[in-house]
Image (spheres, rainbow, N blue to C red):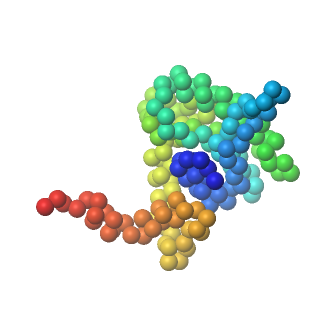
Amino acid sequence: MAYNFLEQLVSEWYEYKGYFIRQNVLVGKRPEGGYECELDIVAFHPSNNHLVHIEPSMDADSWTEREKRFKKKFDAGIKYIPTLFIGFRLPDKIDQIALLGFASKKNRQSVGGGDIILVSELLEEIFAKLASTSTYYSAIPEQFPILRSFQFVVDYKDGIFDVLFKEKA
């Protein structure tokens, strides 16, 4: 189980899409104790041979701080991820994503060596897929509580929107 909502959502989404997930993985064990870094989400899709490292963040840090933090995480990912899926033939390239809640892509598309994806873009992708499913015919499995909740929102959107956008009398 991920330790925060955004990590949990990303884990559920990628697992739902058929990826094997490793989350909150401590890497780079130090001889004096502790670890070099924690990788938030590493996802591998064996039939598509796709490997992705996602670092979700709701920070409001400066781009300078973000650059430093994400570079450390993505460099550690390149170094240690090949050891996380022993027995699988992994692709040479690891897609690395900084998933940001408070950011804009107007002036930059990457940070720390990884591509920037906004939380709003992830939600659009998820809801676009869920719009073509139904809890009646293709319910999201209960092991994905956030995605399943989103599916119910899609199915019952008319009533929900009535409540949300009701004219105040």
Seen in the picture, residue 107 relative to 166 is either above or below; the reply is above
Residue 1 x, y percent position in the rendering: 63, 53
Q: Image check: 94 left or right of 97?
A: right
Q: Is residue 134 visible?
A: yes
Give the residue displayed 47% in from the left and 58% down from the top: 127
Residue 146 in the image: above or below residue 32: below
Q: On the rendered image, what quadrant is the C terminus found in? A: bottom left
The x and y percentages for residue 3 are 59, 47
Q: Residue furthest top?
A: 64
Q: Residue furthest right?
A: 87
Q: Residue furthest front?
A: 33
Q: Is residue 52 visible?
A: no
Q: Is residue 103 left or right of residue 66?
A: left
Q: Report whether 88 appears left or right of 127.
A: right
Tell me what residue is drawn at x 17 percent, y 59 percent. Answer: 168
Outermost residue toward the bottom? 136
Residue 87 locus on image (x, y percent): 86, 51
Residue 69, located in which quarter of the rendered image? top right
Q: How many marks?
A: 0
**Point 55% across, 73% down: residue:** 138
Q: Residue at x 48, y 63 (%)?
A: 149
Residue 17 drawn at (x, y percent): 63, 59
Q: Is residue 109 above or below residue 157?
A: above
